[in-house]
Image (tube, helix red, strand yellow):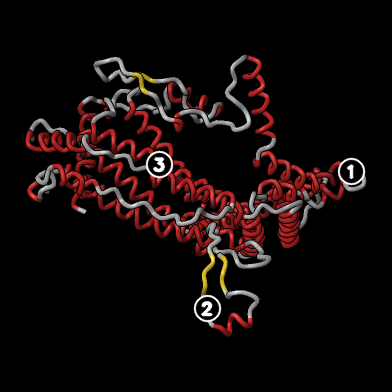
């Protein structure tokens, strides 16, 4: 806690110094529109049109005095295709471009877009037939068609929630529209004031309860649409209002029409969410959980390599864009951001699973929530290790004793083998098991925390003496060791929870009774096969 408090103080101090520097430079004296630069916009466009994998070319470490070529790992390179070798000719590269188009058309997003188009046209076809075109216009079925296009969701759980939420929001809007209109007997000034008051209250629910944003928004839209139409009829007259082919209904009829159109549109969306086959939030939760575990393995690999580089001083200059540490920092930040976004999506899918109808056994939602929380805890501890290791590079010319201790500490670390990637391998196994539903390999155990302190004390007993406790590097090392132990503890729980979901490859035979009576009553020894 003292280390984190000290680190927070340093961060706040750096922020204050940065703000003072901007004031002294005169930046704050003038106002201007801050827009992304050309370089930033170019990166956004190139990232949107290309894959996220970086180039496979070797990068020189220009921070070193000698010419050194860095062999980057496979994680920096493009993902390998087990069915195709890398293209070696212009024709093969052209073939890869054609394959990319087919991948886009065959993606889950394209399949969902096709579903939405089919669901929307199942109502829109009424407008294109001669016998039903007038009915489509007069009964305002365009409202139902719009609700289909904006109300469909990928997973069945979100679809059920959206169906119930939008219908409930329309019912609320129908009731509030009656209040807005008939309390003031349709007088325009009073209607506008009451519409403002009800919209203000509904906006409060949008900000206070984001989970029910759909209900509040559909209520506001329906209120404005119904009340606004009645005000329009008052202004332009009934004859002009009916010139579009739609009859001008009074508000007490128009509001139920809106409810009927919304309910019909959401019913069509609900049917097409399950037809021809449902995409459940439960299956999406399992797949995303597997992806989350794989990202966590990547993040730990980045953190482990970063710590090793910082301890032995082989990362180069962090300010150099081509240095190994700079590239690791970029990769680590990208993986960390993706993992946070994926964890938020996992919690959302988990919340939607209770809205899905259950056929067969119950869905183990509590088990999934426990695994998600354990992944979040491990991610937090890894991020803490990554941040604490940066203090080991701290160099203050005004404190030569601290610089000397860090130098000695780094020299000892370089003499110790730091290779410990069992955690990465274990997380990758868990990811594959959850994604494909395969059982775990037998006798899988959580990796033990790397006990660097014991190895350092065996070399130099004074390096971790309590007399160095006031030095930031000492505290940072202690934080790393504690976080490493906590990761090991949570990994054991994670393995057990995943094992309870997918099972374990175990053909052992366990004798649970060897009595003569049991042997006589059974065809063979009583046992259990796992």
Structural crowding at the residue carrying mark 1, measured as other residues with C-alpha within 10 Å and reported as few (<14), some (14–19) or many (≥20):
few
Q: Position of residue 69 (x, y in %)?
A: 35, 19
Q: Which residue is mark 3?
A: 299
Q: Which residue is mark 2?
A: 513
Residue 238 seen in this snapshot: yes
| Residue at 64%, 50% in the rendered image | 153
Q: Nearer the viewer, mark 3 or mark 1?
A: 3
Direction right: furthest residue:
131
Q: Secondary structure at mark 2?
A: loop
Direction bottom: furthest residue:
517
Q: Nearer the viewer, residue 271 or 163?
A: 271
Structural crowding at the residue carrying mark 3, measured as other residues with C-alpha within 10 Å and reported as few (<14), some (14–19) or many (≥20):
many
Structural crowding at the residue carrying mark 2, measured as other residues with C-alpha within 10 Å and reported as few (<14), some (14–19) or many (≥20):
few
Q: Secondary structure at mark 1?
A: loop
Quarter where residue 184 is shown: bottom right
Q: Nearer the viewer, mark 3 or mark 2?
A: 2
Q: Earlier in the sequence, mark 3 or mark 1?
A: 1
Q: Which residue is mark 1?
A: 129
Q: Is residue 315 left or right of residue 99?
A: left
Q: Nearer the viewer, residue 298 or 35?
A: 298
Q: Quadrant of the C terminus?
A: bottom right
Q: Earlier in the sequence, mark 3 or mark 2?
A: 3
């Amino acid at each position: 806690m003292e280390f984190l408090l000290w680190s927070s103080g340093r961060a706040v101090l750096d922020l204050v110094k940065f703000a003072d520097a901007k004031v002294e430079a005169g930046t704050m004296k003038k106002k201007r529109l801050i827009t992304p630069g050309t370089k930033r916009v170019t990166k956004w466009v190139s990232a949107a049109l290309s894959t996220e994998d970086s180039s496979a070319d070797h990068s020189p470490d220009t921070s070193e005095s000698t010419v050194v070529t860095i062999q980057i790992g496979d994680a920096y390179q493009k993902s390998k295709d087990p069915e195709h070798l890398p293209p070696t000719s212009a024709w093969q590269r052209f073939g890869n471009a054609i394959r990319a188009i087919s991948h886009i058309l065959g993606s889950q997003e394209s399949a969902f877009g096709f579903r939405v188009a089919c669901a929307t046209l199942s109502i829109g076809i009424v407008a294109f037939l001669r016998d039903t075109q007038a009915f489509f216009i007069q009964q305002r079925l365009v409202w139902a068609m719009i609700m289909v296009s904006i109300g469909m969701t990928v997973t069945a759980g979100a679809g059920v929630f959206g169906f119930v939420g939008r219908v409930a929001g329309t019912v609320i809007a129908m009731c509030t529209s009656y209040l807005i209109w008939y309390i003031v007997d349709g007088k325009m000034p009073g209607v506008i004031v009451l519409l403002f008051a009800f919209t203000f209250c509904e906006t409060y629910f949008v900000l206070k309860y984001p989970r029910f944003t759909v209900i509040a928004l559909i209520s506001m839209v329906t209120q404005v649409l119904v009340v606004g139409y009645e005000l329009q009829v008052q202004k332009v007259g009934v004859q002009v209002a009916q010139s579009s082919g739609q009859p001008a209904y009074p508000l007490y009829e128009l509001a139920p029409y809106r409810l009927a159109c919304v309910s019909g549109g959401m019913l069509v969306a609900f049917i097409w969410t399950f037809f021809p086959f449902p995409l459940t939030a439960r299956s999406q939760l399992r797949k995303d959980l597997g992806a989350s575990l794989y990202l966590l393995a990547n993040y730990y690999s980045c953190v482990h390599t970063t710590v090793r580089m910082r301890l032995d001083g082989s990362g180069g200059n962090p300010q150099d864009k081509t240095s190994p540490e700079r590239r690791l920092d970029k990769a680590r930040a990208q993986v960390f951001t993706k993992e946070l976004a994926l964890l938020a999506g996992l919690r959302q899918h988990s919340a939607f699973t209770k809205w899905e109808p259950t056929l067969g056994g119950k869905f183990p939602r509590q088990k999934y929530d426990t695994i998600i929380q354990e992944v979040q805890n491990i991610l937090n501890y890894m991020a803490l290790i990554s941040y604490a290791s940066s203090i080991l590079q701290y160099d203050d010319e005004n404190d030569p004793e601290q610089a000397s201790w860090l130098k000695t500490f780094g020299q000892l670390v370089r003499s110790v083998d730091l290779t410990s990637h069992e955690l990465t391998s274990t997380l990758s196994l868990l990811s594959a098991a959850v994604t494909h539903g395969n059982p775990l390999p037998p006798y899988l155990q959580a990796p033990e925390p790397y006990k660097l302190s014991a190895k350092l004390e065996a070399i130099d007993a004074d390096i971790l003496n309590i007399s160095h406790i006031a030095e930031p590097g000492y505290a940072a090392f202690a934080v790393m060791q504690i976080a490493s132990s906590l990761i090991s503890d949570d990994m054991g729980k994670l393995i057990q929870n995943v094992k309870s979901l997918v099972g374990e490859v175990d053909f052992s035979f366990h004798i649970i009774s060897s009595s003569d009576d049991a042997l006589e009553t059974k065809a063979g020894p009583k046992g259990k096969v796992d």
